[in-house]
Image (spheres, rainbow, N blue to C red):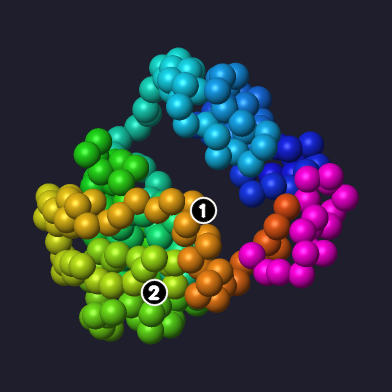
Amino acid sequence: MRALLSGAFANTAFCLFDPEGEERLSRAGRGPSMGLGGRGGRGGRGGRGEQASGDAGVIQRMNQIAAKYSPKGQKEDVTLQDFNSFRQALNVASADQRLLVFLNAENSSGQPVEAELKQVFADSEVVGKFHLKLKDETVDENWSKVVQGATDKPGILIIRSGTFGLEGQIVEQLPISSNAKEIKSAMLNANKSFAAREDRKTYRDHVTSGRRQGIYFENEIPYGEDRDGDGKIDNQRRGRRK
């Protein structure tokens, strides 16, 4: 992030890369409107002013860039999404307000269930609507302690993350032997119900509520921003923990 923002460290940074993640395809900035040259955004002042008129230009530019690339290979060759830990996945799912699909299976690599999941997560009706975590025995041994309805039985779990991503609830559990059609159907049905009940979060209200409740998520990266690039968080002197 410091590299993208010329030494500064902020809570958001935006840049488009090629499919290999190596070549930059846009300028870097606090948000899409800065990186893609759209108007109407305020990416340099917090990155949250990019709604309204700037969106149309950003979307148009993204479509122009995307049109230069086309998918290669087959669905069975896709790389499945994963996270460093279940704890991280649950928190990100809450932030993005997506359902989390968790594969509770030991040594799942190469098993038939992964082949089925690859078909599902490459499906156009599924792409971008869910997060996926594959169980890692070394870091996920306590995952069930924060999930309501969890058991040790292997399976494919669809989990709704809590408001602040510290706990979750199982909304659907499928056998490890489920095929792609069964998995996709269960996921889309769960997502339909989830979308109807899940209220969209308002950033300011959400942060205020978390502070009032004393919510704290321990992160590897220190909280706050270093806009002057001196290597120190600017707001440490305020004496409050975000």
Relative depth, front residue between 129 and 206: 206
Q: Looking at the picture, does residue 79 appear above or below residue 69? A: below
Outermost residue toward the right?
230
Residue 192 horizontal side relative to residue 140, left or right: left
The answer to whether residue 86 is seen in the rendering is: yes
Q: For the N terminus, give its image quadrant.
A: top right
Q: Dot 1, crowdedness within 10 Å: few (<14), some or many (≥20)? A: few
Q: Is residue 101 magenta?
A: no
Of the two numbered discs 1 and 2 on the same chain, state the one appearing first in sequence. 2
Q: Which residues are magenta?
A: 226-242
Q: CA distance from mark 1 to mark 2?
A: 21 Å
Residue 11 in the figure: left or right of residue 108:
right
In this view of the protein, which residue sits in the foreground, 11 or 1? 11
Residue 171 lies in quadrant? bottom left
Q: Is residue 231 magenta?
A: yes
Q: Which residue is pictured at 38% across the width and 80% down the height?
A: 146
Task: Classify mark 2: residues with Cα within 10 Å, few (<14), some (14-19) or many (20+).
Answer: many
Which label belongs to residue 167?
2
Seen at 39% across and 74% down, the residue is 167
Q: Can you say whether 221 is above or below 9 in the image?
A: below
Residue under pointer 1: 204
Discs 1/2, front: 1
